[in-house]
Image (tube, helix red, strand yellow):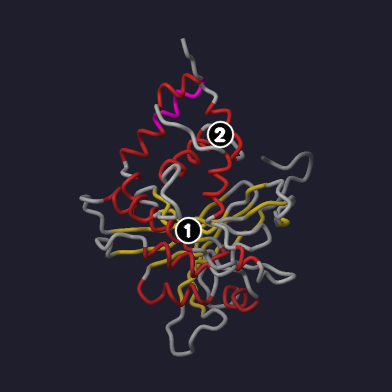
Amino acid sequence: MDLTAHAGLTLVAETLLAVGLESVVQEQLRLRVRQRGHPEFTKLQTCLRIVAAGGDCVEDVRILARDAGLRRLLRRPWPSPDALHAFLATCHNAAAIGQRPATGAWIPPEPPALRALAAVNTALVRRAVAGLPVTEATLDLDATTILSGKRDALPLYRGGRGYQPTAVLWAEQDLVVADQYRDGNVPAGMDPLAVAQHAFAALPPTVTTRAFRGDSACYHDDLLKHLAKRIAFTISADMSPELRHVCTARGVVWHRFEARVTELVEVAEVEFTPGRWPKTAAPLRYVALRFTPTQGSLFGEPPK
């Protein structure tokens, strides 16, 4: 009797087939120079299985391939680590990496393989909502950090070394519509416009009402100008000296928002034009928060 501790991976395989990933990959992801060996879908599916099983390197496919019970359930051969390395190497743009500047953050251009993977994701997003009355999309852009022990990994702002990818989530549908893998030293606020544009381009044509949300890393003139034309947006603003001057002006009307144990929170609406905002354009609406500490305890521990 063959037993396995990875029976859940069969559900991963069934899900990938159910969403039509195989046909999408056949249409969009054509990387093989020769027609021998495993097709792209098999190699991509294997990478996803490794991640789902908790693996952290390509060589972990050997562990899954030795699982006799899993082999009987899946009934498909496993690509070798060398085959997976060759598959992933197509996403590496060696010529572009050679142009990396000696210092500073840098985002290389995406090679054709990565653009093809993005096209696969776009097709899956549109399939997921096909036939639904989808007309609205709120996109959330954010970045995260991934620690890595690779020699090429660069320092992270939080400490350690690794990578800092960005991703855009379609909030109403809980779908990732775009992403960009970045070196660890690339700040989240570096060129958010490109990622946002890719995300909006991935939406189905039925979406007519679009909105965008982001933290202060998205407080970038180029992105603000792009959004202000036709997209509703909410972005956390950097408190620059100019914005602080507007918020502290005598005519600003503050309203109580929340009374906390240690502070009073007030809110006000102000109009402000950031950095390189066109002089002829209308100012943006800012919602400002003011925090006023309450009187502390005279004796003992402060209230909690």
Q: Is residue 265 left or right of residue 8?
A: right
Q: Name the spot of residue 120 as percent of width and height, x first.
A: 38, 54
Residue at x 48% of width, y 77% of height: 271
Q: Is residue 266 left or right of residue 206?
A: right
Q: Which callout, 1 or 2, points at the residue further toward the start of the chain?
A: 2
Percent of width and height locating residue 273: 51, 80
- Residue 279 in the magenta stretch? The answer is no
Please say if 50 is above or below 24: above
The residue depicted at 71 percent of the width and 69 percent of the height is 104
Q: Residues within 10 Å of mark 2 (few under 14, many from 20)?
A: many
Label 2 element class: helix
Q: Which residue is pictured at 49% across the width and 72% down the height? A: 223
- Tell me which corner region of the image, top left, top right, bottom left or bottom right, holds residue 92: bottom right
Marks 1 and 2, how far apart at CA: 22 Å
Q: Name the spot of residue 78 as percent of width and height, x first.
A: 48, 33
Q: Amino acid at mark 1?
A: Ala
Name the quarter where the C terminus is drawn: top right
Q: Pointer 1: residues within 10 angstroms few (<14), some, or many (20+)?
A: many
Magenta extent: 5-11
The correct choice, above or below, for 131 with respect to 105 in the image is above
Residue 59 locus on image (x, y percent): 61, 37
Closest to the observer: 258 or 71?
71
Q: Nearer the viewer, residue 86 or 163?
A: 86
Query: Depth check: 276 or 161 in front?
Result: 161
Q: Secondary structure under badge 1?
A: helix
Numbered label attached to residue 113? 1
Name which residue type carries label 2: Val
Residue at far bottom of view: 280
**Mark 2 — residue?**
61
